[in-house]
Amino acid sequence: MGIREEVYYEGGPHVGDLIINLLIGLTLIGIPLTVGAIVRALWLRYRITNRRISVTGGWMGRDRTDIIYAEIVKIVKVPRGFGLWGDMVLTLRNGSRLEMRSVPKFRELYDYISEKAAEKNPQVKTKATT
């Protein structure tokens, strides 16, 4: 029997992202941003466990990406929404990147992901922008 998978975080993007983008959507220029925020709010879901990161998104939530911590070589976080939520970019060994947008509790999740990735890959690079 394998190790039991324990969920650390499961949920969607921060609600503040939707609220701010709805306000921006009152202008004609902000409409595309608002549509993007609505699509994220409806169908984007994050699941972070002790074994992997799963991101479900896309139109109607049909796309799913699973990443194990050993594949991560670099993690960058950027605060958004006055620091209430943030974006993270995970760079993988093969050079591809996974963008995680409007992540709630992004500081705690960044620390957790960094810790798990460093356990599996000691050369992992972490970077936080302020």
Image (cartoon, rainbow, N blue to C red):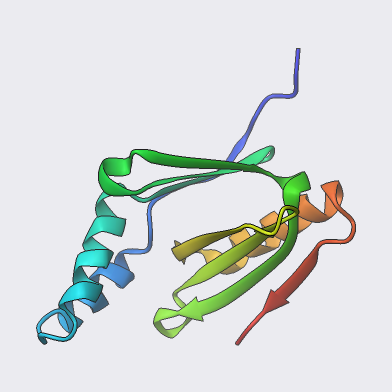
Q: Position of residue 24 (x, y in %)?
A: 19, 83
| Residue found 69% across the figure and 63% down from its top | 111
On screen, residue 42 versus residue 50, left or right, reads: left
| Residue found 50% across the figure and 70% down from its top | 87
Return the residue found at the far right. Answer: 122
| Residue found 15% across the figure and 76% down from its top | 31
Please state which of residues 113 and 27 is positioned toward the viewer in this rendering. Answer: 27
Quadrant of the frame with the C terminus: bottom right
On screen, residue 78 versus residue 29, left or right, reads: right
Residue 33 position by quadrant: bottom left
Above or below for 94 versus 67: below
| Residue found 44% across the figure and 65% down from its top | 101
Q: Position of residue 68 (x, y in %)?
A: 69, 42
On screen, residue 12 versus residue 42, left or right, reads: right
Q: Position of residue 89 (x, y in %)?
A: 59, 66
Please state which of residues 28 and 46 is positioned toward the viewer in this rendering. Answer: 28
Residue 90 position by quadrant: bottom right
Residue 50 position by quadrant: top right
Q: Position of residue 118 (x, y in %)?
A: 83, 55
